[in-house]
Image (cartoon, rainbow, N blue to C red):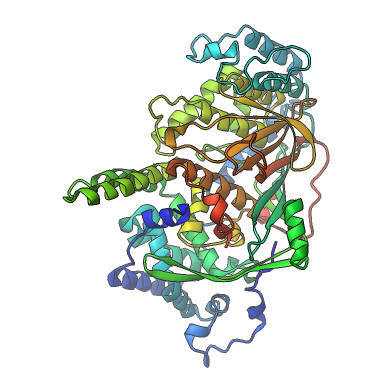
Amino acid sequence: MTVRPQVSHLTREVDDQEIDDQEVDDAALVEQSHHSPERFAVLYDRYFPEIYRYVAGRLGTQVADDLAAETFLVAFRKRESFDAARGQVRAWLYGIATNLVAQHRRSEARRLQALQRTAGERVTDSGHEDLVAQRLTAAAVQGRLASALAALSAADRDVLVLTALAGLGYEEIAQALGISPGTVGSRLFRARRKLRDALGGVNPMRKDFGDADG
Amino acid sequence: MDDLNTVRDLLSAPSPSPQVTMEGRARLLASLGVRTTAPNAGENFPPATATRSRSRRSAAEAARRDGAPRTARWTALGTGLLATAAAVTVVIASGSAPDSPDSITLAQPSSASASPGLSTRPGAAPSARQILLAAATSVAKTSADGDYWVKHVVVGGTEPAPNGKYRLRRTWSQELWASPAAGEPTWRISQFLGAKPAGPEDEKAWRADGSPKTWTYPAKQITTDGKSTVVPGRTVTSAPGAREAQREDAGGSLGTLAGGEPMTPDRLDRLPATPEGLRDYLEKVVEKTVARGGMPPLGKGENTDQRLYDLGVTVIMHFPVSPQVRAAAYRMLASLPTVTALGEVTDALGRRGRAVGIPRTAALGASEGAERLVVDTETGLPLALEYTDAPDWSRQGAAVLFYEALKESRWTDEKPDLPAKTSGPKDAAG
């Protein structure tokens, strides 16, 4: 495994009385929550918006209204199992959210189907010719992308969406999903290869393969 | 156009409303006083695993009590192995699969093959069909005896160095040890093997760059839906990491097929051992996957060959199936008319073998990348699955961008060499 920069700050003494919440790092908050559960709410404030957008992106806002909050309840219940030496809180939360998403695969399939359809419908009400043409192209790309996403295996899709939506790197995704970074790499590679096929002639690998890892 | 940005755009969702945020916060606060560690559906391991492993275990124990011989692997293989293999050969030789629309393709490689006119002429390069059928014959003779099934894969990926001057290759080792014996846990052992310049040209550039031993990718900011997130930087080292072992309950999934079917030992046991049977089975997997929205329906003029190819390769590469099932998977691949021979190659671990691949159709847009399966013609064992971002392998300078190389995939009486540090459910040993 590569160096985990998160580890070093754990040795630092954190006095939560004197340091503003904004500056207390995540792992310390989890640690503090063992004695002072309310400290966990700081993590909620910090990460709820992005976890919500992640869940909503995959399952739609209706499901996210409930499931995003559930992520934090689950995280709080199993906070004992968070091992700061093995990674960071943010990736850990995404892992829990992803496990919850996994229990709603039907909602996900429905959302991707809806995205395929709406991609085609969005253009119909437009007037200007150039605009229509432009939107048709964009809609076609989005429709193909949605169907390509639906075609991925759930495992490949998890890795791809964590990369694209959460911006997690190999090691973070490995931590989040409890798999090895090598597995993350092969899933991401497969997934992007299929997307590239779907988008037609675009080669994401050449330009930013390394980027996917960042 | 960047595919990751496109995905981000497609799946962009609005921020939570203040009401949703407040309700969620209230729910959390309400639960903060509760210190229960009740099992919850959102845990890391599928809740079904424990149950499954228990029933699996008791089944195995029952078998043992009944004095059943160490039944072949997940169930009965071993004896009769050669007889089955011979029978399979006959089926194929007669080219029969009367109910399959593609049955004619069993007879001859179609003109779509990359090397037309391949014959049994001595000296001529073998066709994909010949390579795969030979591999089937060899692999059917391999042993299925042993306490453990071990799969040892080396995975390598190429990416630009942080300064973009050369390419780095990072490799990982992954071992999977699974035993059919009651209560024996499954072990997954992984290790980062280090990073180094990907090829000779890269090595030159790396030397010119001062031969660094670590590479740091800086933190960066990404914007999702108008909100920015800082992704922390990371450092890649040339030094290998520690071996880490993860323990899993016996009887659980050893991987999935088409992202849906968890392949438990029970399921692996039931895989058909004839090419026709396996093809039927995999076609049903494709149908099921399409029905649940996990794959798009077939497009116009598209057949299932590419999908069957992918699933067949997965069976050969990744699952602890009997030699007969592996042979059947090879024969099924041999029956796909568009599978193409890609010549004799050296795989990422320096081993010689013969490569085959399947051209990806333009139904979803032409692909610029290609992949190939490298097979050891002597043993019939799969060596590696390699990917390039060149349009095809015949292109000059087509370099392996990513690979999964099988070091081992066999039954053994050896035990996993476990590192001091392991993780996983403590009760796995039962």
Q: Where is residue A69 shown, x and y percent of the image?
A: 39, 65
A132 vs B203, left or right, is left
Image-quadrant location for residue B323: top right
Residue at image point 62% right, 71% down: A84
B263 vs B292, left or right, is right
Along the line of sight, the residue nearer the viewer: B104 or A100: B104
Reply above or below: B392 against A146. Answer: above
Q: Where is residue B240 shown, x and y percent of the image?
A: 77, 60
Most extreme residue toward the top is B94
Disc tally is 0
B336 vs A201, left or right, is right
Most extreme residue toward the right is B414
Residue B181 in view of the camera? yes
Reply above or below: B170 against B234. Answer: above
Reply above or below: A9 against B137. Answer: below
Most extreme residue toward the bottom is A18
Image-quadrant location for residue B226: bottom left
Residue B40 in view of the camera? no
Image-quadrant location for residue B271: top right
Q: Where is residue B11 shown, x and y percent of the image?
A: 38, 55
Reply above or below: B86 against B417. Answer: above
Residue at image point 33% right, 67% down: B16
Q: Where is residue B243 shown, x and y percent of the image?
A: 76, 57
Residue at image point 44% right, 57% down: B5
